[in-house]
Image: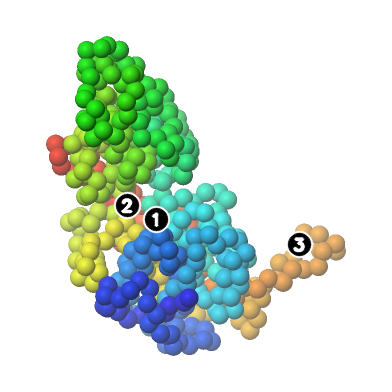
Amino acid sequence: MKIYFTGILFLLAALLPPFPSWGKTTGVENGFGKAGSIKIVIALPTEGSYSFFSRQFINGLLLSLGKQAGGRKINYIIKNLPISAGNKSIGKMFSSLAKKRVSAVIGPIFEGQLKYFAYNSAMFKIPVITPSPVVSGKDFSPYVFNYGMTLKQEIKTEIEYAKYADLSSVAVIYPDYGYGLKLLHYIVKFSKKYGINISDTTAYSEKTVDFFYNFNSIVKFKNTAAAHNISKKEAELGVTKYNMMHGITKLKPIIPFGGLFVIGGPSKLGLILTQLMYYNITGFPIFGLSPFDSESFIEKYGFYMRNAIFTDGFFKHDDNRAVKAFAAAYKKNYGEMPNILSAEGYDIGGIVIKAAERINLSYNKDIDAVSVKSPYIYVFPQKRKEQPQKRLFAGGAEGLIFYRALLRVRRFKGVCGESRLSVNTFKKNLYLFKYKNNQVYILETPF
């Protein structure tokens, strides 16, 4: 299913079911005339459990359509791309978009499909703008532009703070599934770079609810039979009945590290934080990532977040004028405050507008070996005598023109901060927060 949006913002979006069909847009099909339209496809899952994330992103993106760009209308076409879609499906999509002379593709949100986007963006010469939290080497393509808070960036920011705080060692609790191993890799990498020792690491599984054995591998308990919490209290804290638990909670264990990285989703983080205090493993900075930056999470677990350090790429309560205006407009249109996905969608929409304003209609400058009349490019293999030349569909000139226009957006100031384009990544700083005395303090901002 495809849904089309023009450069006019529909204020009824919040009142309609998710991703309604609002009709097809009209636009000039034969290039970028003064009144021509620029086709941008948003390829995200719009059905199923992941549609919630897509809706947050698209809501923010639509708010950026308040003005025309360089006299050209921007037409967004939303295409449902299931999270399970692989290289074959994504290749067919890009082939179809190339024939329809699409200028760029926005997506995916998640890392799994990015390598397929990268391959096909290079094949069909259609630039991709992604908010994916992970962009690794296998996902690289000259046509992939990244604008989003990455996990690597979060870890780097927190390790830099650990260095600033003069911490000599840290320990890590992480999941053995999802992004857990990748995050551990980043922690090891940046700790080594900044001269911070990793005292111990411990992994937990998806089924783990009792973290005693994880704690037992990173601290040294002083065993005694003097203390024992009643069963009701144990149940409240999420721990189970093991004899090893009894008699060790009142004496503070030996803690050989200066800070602790706690990695996981909100439900696991809540269990870990409460059990850390249950076992009196306290008195050091707890490094968490963006899941800590949630009003509902802080309201529920703030008591256990003493000296917690965490990051995020967007702060809806910032006093920055642009952030305040965006948050107010989002609240007015959608009845709720924006989150990081909403903010990244809004900023990517702004980057699209900036690029559209920088389009150079002089084809001989924006197109190297591609003829305006021919939608094909030619790639010659090294051994020309043994293998005939390959003919690759390039989708006309629009993709290449917009690609060059994106490269001209050297700097961008959005609601996620000030960024500069470096090797196809819009690099920017993150917010760094500290939770202390029941308040959140801003240590660093991206502005």
Going 55% across and 62% down the picture, which residue do you hit? 85
Going 44% across and 59% down the picture, which residue do you hit? 109
The circle drawn on residue 148 is 1
The circle drawn on residue 313 is 2
Q: Earlier in the sequence, mark 2 or mark 3?
A: 2
Distance Cα–Cα, label 2 vs label 3: 43 Å
Going 43% across and 28% down the picture, which residue do you hit? 201
Residue 237 screen position, x and y as percent: 25, 33
- Front disc: 1 or 3: 1
Identify whether 96 is placed above or below 273.
Answer: below
Amino acid at pointer 3: Pro
Distance Cα–Cα, label 1 vs label 3: 36 Å
Q: Which residue is under mark 3?
A: 381
Q: Earlier in the sequence, mark 1 or mark 3?
A: 1
Q: Earlier in the sequence, mark 1 or mark 2?
A: 1
Amino acid at pointer 1: Gly
Identify whether 320 is placed above or below 296.
Answer: below
Residue 203 in sight from this viewpoint: yes
Residue 218 screen position, x and y as percent: 38, 23
